[in-house]
Image (cartoon, grey):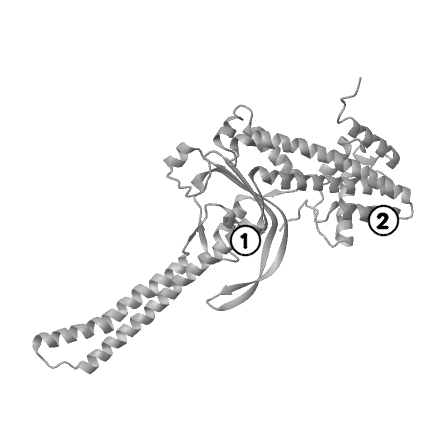
Amino acid sequence: MTREHYIPFNKEFLLEQQINAFAEDQQKVDDFKKLFDIIEHYFHYEAFNLNRNLKQHYALFDPDLSIKERKGFIDKSDFTVFKETLLTVLEQGNYTRIDQETLNIAFKESDLIGLNLSIDFNAFKDYEMYVRGHHTSTEKVTKYFFWKKKVQIEYYDRVMIYLHYNDTHFLKEKKVKLGKMPIEPGSVVLKIFKRVPKNDLETIFPNAIPRMSTTDKLLLWVPGIFGGISLLSTKVIPALISMYDAYQSGETIDLLNSKTSLNQGLIALGILSLYLFRQYNNFVNKKIKYSKILSDSLYFKNLGNNSGAFYSLLNSSEEEVLKETILAYTFLYKSEKPLTAVELDDQIESWFSTKLNTDLDFDVKDALQKLKNIGLGIETNGKWEVIPLNQALITIDELWDSVFAYNQK
């Protein structure tokens, strides 16, 4: 997998790591904590405004609201504004969109369930997946009947699926069946999951239906057809014909041989039937396994649905922005000279690699832009520096005070 912008450490840990260099100066340690405490509150306020914006412009497309409630947001909810705001939150939270090629591979392959899933994409006007974080885990999977094999499975730590359903007219025209799902045509569904296998992404689609794979069909029908025809033509039918001809002609029936031949054929047919039942039962067991995975996704892996997903996304967004700001400010503060964006990026990524054994692609552009927006970063001829800590405390306090200016004369 490619390197991600996502920083897999919490903000408190990163701050402690950075201010350890000033452990002997308690006043400076306290000032750093005060600075980032105010910055965190300011970013939380920005996240609150994003949340309010998302909720208003999503309401008309929220399947959790009643029709009456949704009608109240006609001319108040703007889909374009909603989508743009959602993409902003996802970008700040360091989520990455899964491209169609990766999705197609996931739809064709399966790491855990070994089952083909049929998805009627006509149900959706648009669908997208966004992921953040990944890890590899060793799992046992069944291969060739009873043999279990250990394989390396790639997981996404977080997956958000975005489903924009088509309107009623289109669904009727394409004869799309939504089944028992309480989905209002034209609505937008958002779901966030944790720990989803990279090659089993299709399992989180709500309309995924298990189908027999080509291998399953071949194992079921080929032996059944050819084995059945062979047994009937060589054993059962000849024995029955022989018995019938003897009966018609009045000849003595070789009952022992006829019965033996007939019994052998029927036993072979019984064995074939058991084999076919076993093959079909394997498919049924895969469906049960899929249902278990689906159940786990719904009850244990699901982190948020629709408007409830905003809180998870905004929390991630707020955390990532703060972590990037902490790192950019402290590295520039400790530098003896101004740094270019590339130099700062290299220093931070090298620190993660050597100190925390983590390979990531630090989003230096966004971090520097945040520092500039809140008045702590200064760019001169392509080189960046930050204002002194005591001045930074005053600047960020003034920025926070200016958020609510109701008492100004």
Other residues around mark 1 within 10 Å, as few (<14) / some (14–19) / many (≥20): few
In this rendering, the answer to whether 197 lies above or below 397 is: below
Give percent across and percent down for residue 304: 58, 43
Q: Is residue 257 left or right of residue 227?
A: left
Labelled disc at residue 296:
1
Visible residue check, residue 335: no
Give percent across and percent down for residue 21: 87, 48
Q: Quick one: which residue is furthest to the top in this view?
A: 409
Instruction: State the separation of the CA atoms marked 1 and 2.
Output: 42 Å
The image shows a total of numbered marks equal to: 2
Residue in view at x 67 percent, y 38 percent = 92
Labelled disc at residue 243:
none
Which quarter of the rendered picture does the C terminus lie within?
top right
- Mark 1: which secondary structure? helix
Other residues around mark 2 within 10 Å, as few (<14) / some (14–19) / many (≥20): few
Which residue lies under the disc numbered 2? 20
- Counting residues from the start of the chain, the first of labels 1 and 2 encountered is 2
Visible residue check, residue 308: yes
- Identify the amino acid type marked 2: Asn
Q: Is residue 257 left or right of residue 65?
A: left
Residue in view at x 27 percent, y 76 percent = 264
- Identify the amino acid type marked 1: Asp
Give percent across and percent down for residue 69: 52, 29
Q: Is residue 52 left or right of residue 185?
A: right
